[in-house]
Amino acid sequence: MEPTVDEVYDMPGHLVRRFQQIAVAVFHAEVGAAGYDLTPVQYAALVAVATNPGIDQATLAGLIAYDRATIGGVVERLVQKGFLARRVSGRDRRARELHVTEAWRENAARVTPAVQRAQERMLIGLTQDESGRFMDLLRKAIAAANDLSRAPLRLAGTDETAGD
Amino acid sequence: MEPTVDEVYDMPGHLVRRFQQIAVAVFHAEVGAAGYDLTPVQYAALVAVATNPGIDQATLAGLIAYDRATIGGVVERLVQKGFLARRVSGRDRRARELHVTEAWRENAARVTPAVQRAQERMLIGLTQDESGRFMDLLRKAIAAANDLSRAPLRLAGTDETAGD
DNA sequence: TCAGATTAGTAAGTATACAAATGATATGTG
DNA sequence: CACATATCATTTGTATACTTACTAATCTGA
């Protein structure tokens, strides 16, 4: 039998889509209230570059599971905002070395608490215990299905060739 | 202290983003293998219209938590594919009545099994029991945070005004 | 009944996502 | 060294997503 809307809405794919929608909305609300105009993706990129100074875009993409074609625009917008510096690598002239700017280092401490609040708020319906179990299950599901997506997380220091 | 990439990657917002990425990839793979070029969003829209013949776009958007501005393009592409018919409503000339076409009714039975397989495959890392608990937690989290998003699910027959 | 508020749909602008193709540069092999 | 291959980044094209603004149509209340 063909499913009804209610059944489709209760499928894992749709529940996840809906929760992600909520997660992004909450992130914008909290970070916006703190006076910043940053997306979840932009924030993750900034933290990744801060943790790995001089990283190139392709490696950055692998670190946080972005598409290589998408990262260019994300970086570009962060350069526009003055939070990232991008320059051609000396070792490999195809690559762009990325660094966070002093401006970001000065602002990070004000953005981070807003991000933390967003993470708590999106799980407002769950107890501490449930939140923990939810994240355990999410981690486990992702670990098993990681290779099924086109932009699989590439751990630093790992060099599995993506069978594609 | 400022978080590292690993810490950001382990935040609920990012885990959900990653799982949603996987969910979409798996959906495309399964539905594509069945010979169809449909997105998760398009499939949900088709099921919603099939369940509610003559529904207008705004109500459809509310049913499956889409943005009103997004649904237009989704419907347009489904009309192009010959799966949806759209005509101006007699009762309200602003509204467009939507109906699935005979073409969709003939193909639905071949698409649905692929969609079901996708739902199972994205949870391949979890046992049946864990999958159930995962979905329970997801439902509970969404129910509590529903109003925090700009495109909250509007249950049919409910008329709460979105406090914004 | 008529002015004001609401609503349906669209449009423009911004930001992910991802596929496929391209240009520039590296690298490995003979 | 020359050539095939691989890689980095970008470009093009398609599809969500959401904001703000706008038009057209409908509804509401005095």
Image (cartoon, coloured by chain):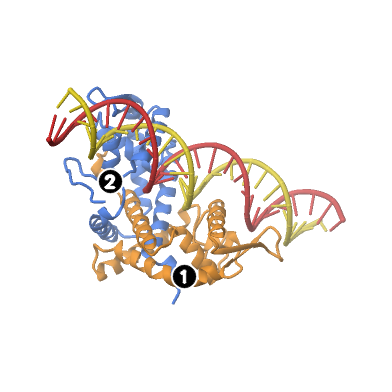
Chain colours: A orange, B blue, C yellow, D red
Counting from the top left corner in percent of width and height, residue B141 is at 26, 59
User: As shown in the figure, which amino acid type bears the numbered disc 1?
Assistant: Ala
Residue A29 in view: yes
User: As shown in the figure, which amino acid type bears the numbered disc 2?
Assistant: Tyr
On the image, numbered disc 2 is attached to which residue?
A: A9
Quick one: A105 or A8, which is closer to the camera? A105
Q: Residue A63 bears which disc, if any?
A: none
Q: Is residue B134 left or right of residue A86?
A: left
CA gap between label 1 and label 2 equals 38 Å
Quadrant for residue B33, please give it.
top left
Q: Looking at the picture, do discs 1 and 2 lie on one chain?
A: yes
Counting from the top left corner in percent of width and height, residue D15 is at 44, 40
Of marks 1 and 2, the one in the foreground: 1
Residue B101 in view: no
Q: Quarter of the image containing the N terminus of chain A?
A: top left
Note whether B5 is above or below B21 in the view shown: below
